[in-house]
Image (cartoon, grey):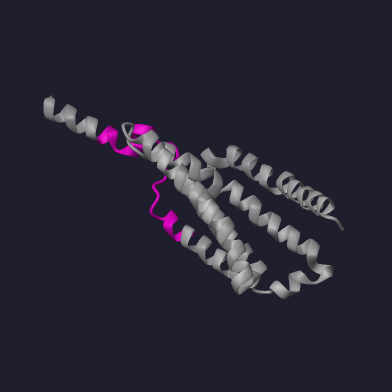
């Protein structure tokens, strides 16, 4: 197989995964974010991403056998579905909601830049780790990082059903000002 055929096959596989898992993940996020809430969605996402990464990593040799490649693609696709249904959607929405109005755009920009930097480190770091310590151990590290994301989710306030002023604490400040001046 020449290089062009290989690139074509990889692009075709990535497109299929995106159409079957990534895009529906975003659709589910849009449909359910106000029903379930940002906190629960993000928590579920990191939980399932952790589970699926461990499910890929622990029996990694099993997934490398020719008869099991479709199962690997399904597990990998489920990881992408939950990544896009939950943390990818909520980590964009939550920073736009939880910061005070005077800092909101700056903090959202810092959050977005941090996410981009993390994605870059993750992509290149995974390739380096896979070459250095192997894919199995690299997947274990990713599972652990997802678990840390799940733990850090407990530090994020729920913004479902609240106004931007309530979430950022500005409503309390306004009430305090009214009480003092009244």
64 shown above or below 168: below
Residue at 84% x, 69% y: name it: 67
Q: Quadrant of the N terminus?
A: bottom right
Residue at 62% x, 42% y: name it: 26
For residue 128, say whether it is visible: yes
The residue at the far right in this view is 1
Left or right, 121 with reference to 57: left
- x, y percentage for residue 81? 65, 50
Residue 173 colored magenta? Answer: no
Foreground of the two, 9 or 88: 9
Residue at 68% x, 43% y: name it: 24
Q: Quadrant of residue 76?
A: bottom right
Q: In which quarter of the image is the C terminus?
A: top left
The residue at the far front in this view is 2
Left or right, 11 with reference to 87: right
- x, y percentage for residue 160? 45, 40
Residue at 76% x, 48% y: name it: 11
The residue at the far top in this view is 182
Q: In which quarter of the image is residue 134?
A: bottom right
Report the span colored magenta. Answer: 150-172
For residue 44, say whether it is visible: no
């Amino acid at each position: 197989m020449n290089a062009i055929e290989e690139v074509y096959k990889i692009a075709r596989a990535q497109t299929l995964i995106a159409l079957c898992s990534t895009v529906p993940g975003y659709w589910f996020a849009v449909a359910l974010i106000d029903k379930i809430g940002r906190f629960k969605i993000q928590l579920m996402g990191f939980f399932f991403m952790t589970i699926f990464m461990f499910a890929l990593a622990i029996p990694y040799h099993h997934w490398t056998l020719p008869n099991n490649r479709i199962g690997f693609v399904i597990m990998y696709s489920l990881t992408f579905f939950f990544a896009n249904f939950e943390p990818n959607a909520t980590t964009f929405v939550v920073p736009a909601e939880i910061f005070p109005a005077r800092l909101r755009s700056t903090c959202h920009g810092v959050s977005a830049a941090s996410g981009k930097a993390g994605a870059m480190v993750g992509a290149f770091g995974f390739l380096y780790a896979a070459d250095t310590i192997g894919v199995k151990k690299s997947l274990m590290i990713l599972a652990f990082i997802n678990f840390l994301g799940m733990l850090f989710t407990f530090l994020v306030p729920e913004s479902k059903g609240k106004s931007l002023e309530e979430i950022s604490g500005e409503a309390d400040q306004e009430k305090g000002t009214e009480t003092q001046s009244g």
